[in-house]
Image (cartoon, rainbow, N blue to C red):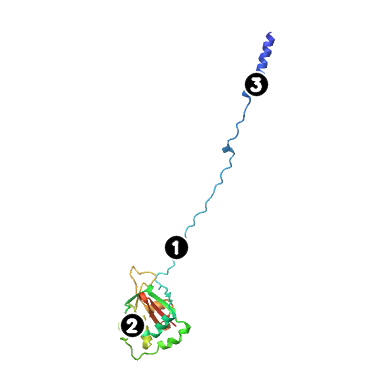
Amino acid sequence: MKNRVIYAFIAALLAASTSPAWAQTTPAPSPQATMAPAPVTTSAPEATAHPAATANPGKHNGQIKKIAAGNLSLAQVTYGLTHMPQEISSLRKLKKVKFANLRVQHVPTTLHRLIRTSQIPSAAVAYEPVTLGDALAQTPSPAPATSGLLGSLLNIIANINISDALNNALNGNTVNLSLSNVLNGNKIAIGQVVGVYVGGAGIITTLLK
């Protein structure tokens, strides 16, 4: 009887050792443990403006601005060449001209025949001839040695004031230049001028041969 009890006890121990409660379980790996690390992105360095690139805004301080090209029609160019007394009279009334109102335009080849006609000296002019006493510029240029209507026109051009013609103001002061100086600054010789057309809103177009 005693041996049976011992055998029963041993059998119970063996059965308990194989039950699920005694089984060792291995926990499943967490999703975070198996995720690949996020790639590290490196942003490109921001471009730094070189001091030399920002030092010059594109304007040459102290230099004369570039005159815009005119867009007169053939009829307007013809009028400017054939009605020089009227255009000179209109130009003389302008005591000071803004640079923004200046234009230059070459006379087309088809109208070159009118250039010589416009330069014929006039025996009688319906207005007082222009003299150097009419000089308006701070530093007037010498009057061109040309007679007749063209001579009067070039005399005005040599002495009329043009404001805001430079790319900068010197010490905050506006510098006035003569129209002839402004033309020279644009590589236009005074001898190239053959006429002028004074249009609406005070736009002055200098005609060039």
Q: Which of marks 1 and 3 is in front?
A: 3
Residue bearing mark 1: 54
* Circle 1: element type: helix
Provide residue 104's location: percent of width, then percent of height: 42, 77
Q: Nearer the viewer, residue 51 or 14?
A: 14
Q: Nearer the viewer, mark 2 or mark 1?
A: 2
* Type of amino acid at the residue the image marks with label 1: Thr
* Type of amino acid at the residue the image marks with label 2: Ser
Q: Which of marks 2 and 1 is nearer the N terminus?
A: 1
Report the quarter where the C terminus lies.
Answer: bottom left
Q: How far apart are marks 2 and 3 (CA)?
A: 127 Å
Provide residue 15's location: percent of width, then percent of height: 66, 19
What is the number of the mark on residue 89?
2
Residue in view at x 35 percent, y 82 percent: 156
Residue in view at x 69 percent, y 13 percent: 7
For this view, does 29 lie left or right of residue 94?
right
Q: Earlier in the sequence, mark 2 or mark 3?
A: 3
What is the number of the mark on residue 17?
3
* Neighbourhood count class around disc 2 (C-alpha, 10 Å): few under 14, some 14–19, many 20 upward: some
Q: How far apart are marks 2 and 1 (CA)?
A: 47 Å
Residue in view at x 34 percent, y 80 percent: 90
Q: How far apart are marks 1 and 3 (CA)?
A: 86 Å
